[in-house]
Structure formats: C-alpha cells, structure tokens
C-alpha cells in the first residue's frame, strides 16, 4: 500500500502531513476523510475516529497549514479566503483521487468534518459531485457570502454545481443557536445538496452550542455501517 501524501497539491496546504487511523486501507471496506476545524489539527481527529469506531474503516486526516483551512469566516466572499480555500479543496479532491487509485472508489469514501472542516467537506462534495459513500457536516455549511436571490446556492457570485451526487447520503447536524454557524446556512446547504441529488438528513438541535452530540455520532455510525454493508 502506497503512502498518501499532499506534496503535489498547490498552495499553502500542499505538503502538509496526514494522520491515518483505524483499518489499513488495503483491508478497509470504507474510508473516511476527516477534516478538522479552525485551530485544531489532524491528530485531534483521532478521538472522533475512535468514537465512530468500526474495524472496517480507514480514516485519513489531512493537516491544514497553520491549523486553518482558510483565514476568514466561511460566510465571507470567496475571494477573501483565497488562495487557502482553493488549496484546501485541492487537498480533499486529491485524497479522493488517491484513495480511488488505491482501489477505494468514491462510493466507499465518506467526507466528514467538524466546524470549518464541515464547511470544507460539504463544499468539496458540491464541487466534485459524484456518488460518495456519504458526507457528514457537523456544525458547518457551504462556503461563501449569502446570495440575496432566494432559491440560489449560498454564494456571493454564481457558482455552478454541475453533475450529481446521485443519492449520496448526507448528514448535517447543528445547533439552532450556534455562534459560528447560522442555522439558515445549514438549511441553504441542505437545499443545495438536495438539488444535486443527495439524500439529506438535516438535524437541528435546540440550544446545543458548537459541538457534536451523541445523536449525531449515532447517525454517523449508521451512515458508515450502511457504506460497509453495501460492500457485502
């Protein structure tokens, strides 16, 4: 089994280290790309991998340069977060392709992130739509300033999501009073991903705060088990 690397990725996140947890990729029924939040690290995702469990899953956690995938709010205009955002997206897309080269197709790959990592996970899936094993966004949403025209994707300028997520199961969990993630953006994200053909499970928790609760973990484990069971 080859060693995964981001050395060929351009921009500030290229060449940053990767952490791997769980099953070996050669034996895994599924792979999860774990995306950490602002100020955190790839290593900090290890407890989440342990909480999600299963002996058949390989976890891959990339590290953001300076512990931040992009410097401004995810609600800022897209240009304000360049070149970090494009580099972050390139890391995720590179890992998807690298896992596929190792024999783990996208239908066996789950993109999962918390906070800034959740924003990156949903945006990466929307910009590279195909049938994934799943997408999990714990306290996050699509990236960009809100479009004032109702019914359009939540971006500051037209960003066309071509293609289809083809029934990809998506789990979005967030508080209704999260100080970092407006609940309306979670709703917009659910709508946009449904328009791309995803099967979205949106769960809003009254008064929860900026964290991950047991119900979200249980739902994510169920999603992973669904991916594993399909490999038969």
Image (tube, helix red, strand yellow):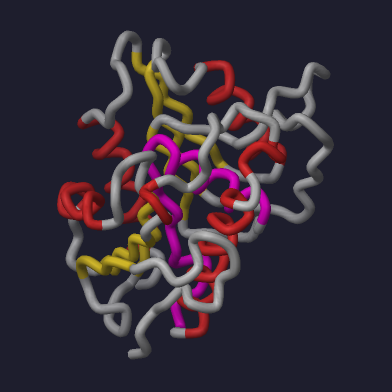
Where does residue 48 sit, x and y in percent of width and height? 22, 47
Q: Position of residue 213 (x, y in %)?
A: 24, 28
Q: Is residue 13 placed above or below 177 in the rendered structure?
A: below
Whether residue 167 is visible to the viewer of this picture, yes or no, is no
Return the x and y of residue 185 as percentages of the image width and height.
Answer: 58, 23
61 left or right of 186 in image: left
- Give the camera-side residue of 204 and 114: 114
Residue farthest to the bottom?
Answer: 1
Residue plotted at (43% across, 57% down): 110
Residue 137 drawn at (x, y percent): 44, 39
First to last magenta residue range: 103-127
Residue 7 vs 110, above or below: the answer is below
Please give the name of the residue rendered at 45% of the width and 33% of the height, measured from the top-left corner.
172
The mark total stands at 0
Say if 184 sits above or below 230 in the image: above
Q: Quadrant of residue 9?
A: bottom right
Q: Is residue 182 magenta?
A: no
Asked if one can make out residue 55 in the rendered structure from this viewpoint, the answer is: yes
Q: Between residues 100 and 120, which one lies in front from this camera angle?
A: 120
User: Which residue is located at x 75 percent, y 55 percent?
Assistant: 163
């Amino acid at each position: 089994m080859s060693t995964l690397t981001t050395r060929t990725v351009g921009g500030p996140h290229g060449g940053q280290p990767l952490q791997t947890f769980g099953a070996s990729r050669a034996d895994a029924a599924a792979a999860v790309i774990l995306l950490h939040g602002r100020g955190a690290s790839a290593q900090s995702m290890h407890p989440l991998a342990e909480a999600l469990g299963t002996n058949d899953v390989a976890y891959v956690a990339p590290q953001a340069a300076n512990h931040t995938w992009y410097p401004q709010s995810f609600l800022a205009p897209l240009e304000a977060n360049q070149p970090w955002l494009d580099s972050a997206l390139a890391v995720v897309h590179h890992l998807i392709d690298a896992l596929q080269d190792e024999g783990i197709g996208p239908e066996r790959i789950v993109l999962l992130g918390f906070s800034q990592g959740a924003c990156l996970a949903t945006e990466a899936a929307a910009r590279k739509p195909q049938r994934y094993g799943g997408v999990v966004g714990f306290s996050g949403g699509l990236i960009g300033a809100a479009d004032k025209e109702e019914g359009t994707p939540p971006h500051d300028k037209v960003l066309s999501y071509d293609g289809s997520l083809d029934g990809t199961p998506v789990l979005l969990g967030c508080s209704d009073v999260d100080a970092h993630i407006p609940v309306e953006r979670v709703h917009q994200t659910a709508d946009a991903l449904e328009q791309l053909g995803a099967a979205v499970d949106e769960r809003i928790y009254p008064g929860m705060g900026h964290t991950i609760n047991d119900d979200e973990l249980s739902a994510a484990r169920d999603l992973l088990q669904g991916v594993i069971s399909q490999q038969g």
